[in-house]
Image: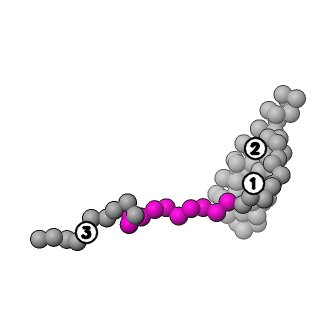
Amino acid sequence: MQHGPKPTNSTRHRPAKRWTSNAARHQPTGFQSARINYERYLTLALAEVQNGNTIAAENYYQHAEHYFRLMSATSEGR
């Protein structure tokens, strides 16, 4: 008993190509990236505190602390 044709390379599933922008973007330096991420996670943590979700807030505070330490280490190396 035959079950139909075997899939060929042209009929197999291929992952979709991701679109990428060719526009020039400002690339922040390491210190700037750390500061931006620190502020972002701190803002997210404060929002979770206001929502009463202390578990999520603590998670965001831990992320913020990581970036705070990166900023401290970067400023000491200057």
Provide residue 35's location: percent of width, then percent of height. Answer: 82, 47
Disc 1 element: helix
Where are the magenta residues, as a range?
11-20
Q: Looking at the image, is mark 1 or mark 3 nearer the viewer? A: 3
Residue at image mark 1:
41
Residue 5, disc: 3
Disc 3 element: loop
The residue drawn where x is 15% and y is 70% is 2
Q: Quadrant of residue 66?
A: top right
Q: Quadrant of the N terminus?
A: bottom left
The residue drawn where x is 72% and y is 60% is 21
Residue at image mark 2:
67
Q: Amino acid at mark 3?
A: Pro
**In front of the other: 4 or 44:** 4
Provide residue 28's location: percent of width, then percent of height. Answer: 82, 47
Tell me if residue 16 is in the magenta stretch.
Answer: yes
The residue drawn where x is 66% and y is 53% is 59
Q: Amino acid at mark 2?
A: Tyr
**In front of the other: 19 or 11:** 11
Asked if the residue at tag 2 contacts the one at tag 1, i.e. Cβ–Cβ closer than 8 Å, the answer is yes
Marks 3/2: CA distance? 55 Å
Q: Quadrant of the C terminus?
A: top right
**Sequence order check: which comes first, mark 1 or mark 2?**
1
